[in-house]
Image (cartoon, rainbow, N blue to C red):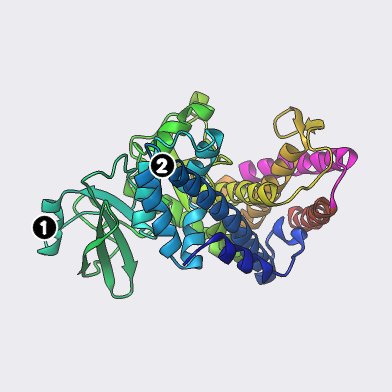
Amino acid sequence: MTTIADVSRDAARDVPGDLSSLVLPDGPEDVAMIQGLNRTAARQYLVRLLRLLRKLVGSRGHFFKGARLALAVLEEADLDYALRLALRPDITAWIWRAEAADAKDASDLDRLLAALLVGDALYLKVVSEAALDSVAKGSAVVLWPQRVRILGVGGQILVGVHDDSAGMGVSARSADGSCLETVVVSRVSSGMVGPEGVPPTSDFVVLDPRDQVIEELAGYEDPMVSADAGQPGFVVGMQTAVDFLDNVWPAGARAVRVDVQAVGRLGGHWGGKPLNFSVHGYRGLVLSSLRRPYKLAQTLVHEAGHNRFSHVTDCYQTSYNGDVESFSPFVGTRRPINHLLHGIISFVNDVCCAARSRTFVPESEKPGLNDYIEVHWGRLQECQRNLRATINPTMHGEQLLAGIDRAVDLVGDLVG
């Protein structure tokens, strides 16, 4: 059972940590602190979700049945599983939308139900009963490594694909949550990436270009969504970036695997320039255009930093004057203090990754990479000075400032 009381007991076992370790992961202790922050944020989102669903159930209105089912799924889950669910980007986004409507409008409750019913599945598909029968009979099924948004669950069957050492387990649930059937299919080499083959493996869920999340966020920066966002080329590129990061910065790679859960491919920005961003409400989601592996590695640690500091802002107060603005050299205009903190934490990880990458990139790429490091290293130092001159920090803010000072010194040694 998972209740708010269970979450409170879990929180009581926590030993308060030092937020300075969150800024720039430099070893196992820092990664452990990031994992602890992740769990703290997950507890908060789980409590928010349980309260929203109980409010919907208590209202006994149009969304009563769906909310009761969603609440039952959560309350019957063990705490660790419920915490993993609560911090998924599709679920955090639902929480923000429902809270904005004061739990009076939960018209996309079916999307929450779909996520909760399938749970930890890496890949989601909506199939008919006939299609499920064909899987059970051993027919070939291509399951691309992407999540297809489920817009309705009435009368449909939700299929989750779980990959483990024994093979690929296909579990199906009906819309009322009952388990229909579990089928195990044999593992096939992940090297086959053609349209008839098995897709490459990935550390992240990869969104389909038609995914509702990408459609909703498309107007955020006006990106062009790539037509092949869910195809193997992007999966291979992103996984190659993580493998590259494993070599040049192991602690950074481990932190990325904590902070980032899902990725989606974008096309170029205005004028075809590369684009990447994340959004506070969609926690753990990174949208990016495709680029060279070392640049994608920078993208991952950069956006992981944004997601990590979003956890901090959800869980802690870092300043007494958060609305006061100061100049941000990263955007060329004045921004509130939290925006400066976002910029510093994301770019200190970005520049750290770039500096660590220099000996691993082709000679022809080094001049451009060195120019990037020089420009953003200067901006980091300027932003650090502006932040120090403006912020009135809380205790947690002081810890972050100490972590920023340490991180900037470490990156300075790498930059040379």
State left or right for residue 182 relative to residue 391. left
Tell me the CA gap for discs 2 and 1: 39 Å
Mark 2: which amino acid? Arg
Q: Residue 246 is drawn in which quadrant?
A: bottom right
Q: In the picture provided, is 19 more to the left or to the right than 385? A: left
Question: Does the magenta segment cover residue 103?
Answer: no
Residue 23, position as x, y percentages in the image: 72, 55
Residue at 39 percent of width and 60 percent of height: 120
Dot label at residue 60: 2
Whole-percent x, y for residue 6 in the image: 56, 66
Q: Amino acid at mark 1?
A: Ser
Looking at the image, residue 400 lies above or below residue 340: below
Who's the residue at 15% across and 56% down the image? 132
Q: Residues within 10 Å of mark 2 (few under 14, many from 20)?
A: few
| Screen quadrant of the C terminus | bottom right
Residue segment shown in magenta: 366-394
User: Nearer the viewer's eye, disc 2 or disc 1?
Assistant: 2
Tell me the tag on residue 134.
Answer: 1
Among all residues in the image, which is located at the extreme bottom?
166
